[in-house]
Image (spheres, grey):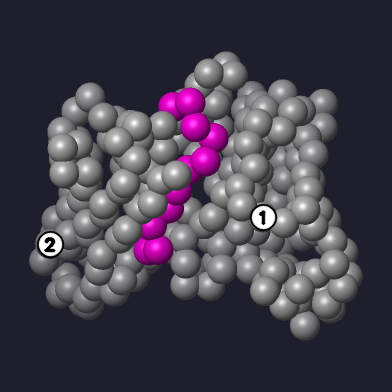
Amino acid sequence: DAGVTQSPTHLIKTRGQHVTLRCSPISGHKSVSWYQQVLGQGPQFIFQYYEKEERGRGNFPDRFSARQFPNYSSELNVNALLLGDSALYLCASSLANTTRALLSGELFFGEGSRLTVL
Amino acid sequence: GENVEQHPSTLSVQEGDSAVIKCTYSDSASNYFPWYKQELGKGPQLIIDIRSNVGEKKDQRIAVTLNKTAKHFSLHITETQPEDSAVYFCAATSYNNNDMRFGAGTRLTVKP
């Protein structure tokens, strides 16, 4: 079975540009989360989506947005890129299947999209 | 909100020795504590997790202990091998929380 897949794997942008990152969860997983991992630090929560609705948002500016599609894949969008947005962006899916247990266990991470902003 | 602290930031051991990584958390409502291993260029991969209704869990050479009173949990790796070299992250969350908080990571190096 395919794991969580993310694209692109690497990309370089300049300040002020916009970027779209894509994620396909494991088949059967309805919950997708996005994390930002700056070099040398642990992943930091950006968003969670479940059944196409935003269920949680971390402490990130409005330049960050996301959505989930009917097939449960997801996109993360970042506008007006800053140098500090350079990071590994991780997508994770999970088997959360109720609104009460949005994180019922293991997060399965993709290999990430490494964004460099020049 | 939850705050997770992890120590040490780097750890170097000789092959065959044991390695211990410790984490503390702040939110007493947290009840799920996973450990992730991240190899260079890859996403984090779950290696073991523990829920708040148990104090210890073991899987071959890896074990995790949890002290809810003191709000700390630890990862123990015995008989370390060079392939154990990676960055290890602890994390904490609760079942009705969609935000998993990670520690800053421990870079483990196992010298042959």
* 2 and 1 marks in contact (CB < 8 Å): no
Task: Answer with the quarter of the image where residue B67 lies.
Answer: top left
* Chain where mark 2 sits: B
Residue drawn at x 41%, y 38% as measured from the top left: B93
Is B88 above or below relative to A55?
Answer: below
Residue drawn at x 30%, y 60% as measured from the top left: B6
Decide which of A8, B25 is in the foreground and name it.
Answer: B25
Pointer 2 residue: B18
Task: Answer with the quarter of the image where residue A113 lies.
Answer: bottom right
Q: Which amino acid does label 1 sit on?
A: Phe
Horizontal and vertical percent position of residue B59: 22, 39
Q: Identify the magenta region.
A: B95-105
Horizontal and vertical percent position of residue A30: 66, 26
* Chain where mark 1 sits: A
Is B54 above or below relative to A89?
Answer: above
Left or right of A6? Residue B84 is left
Pointer 1 residue: A60
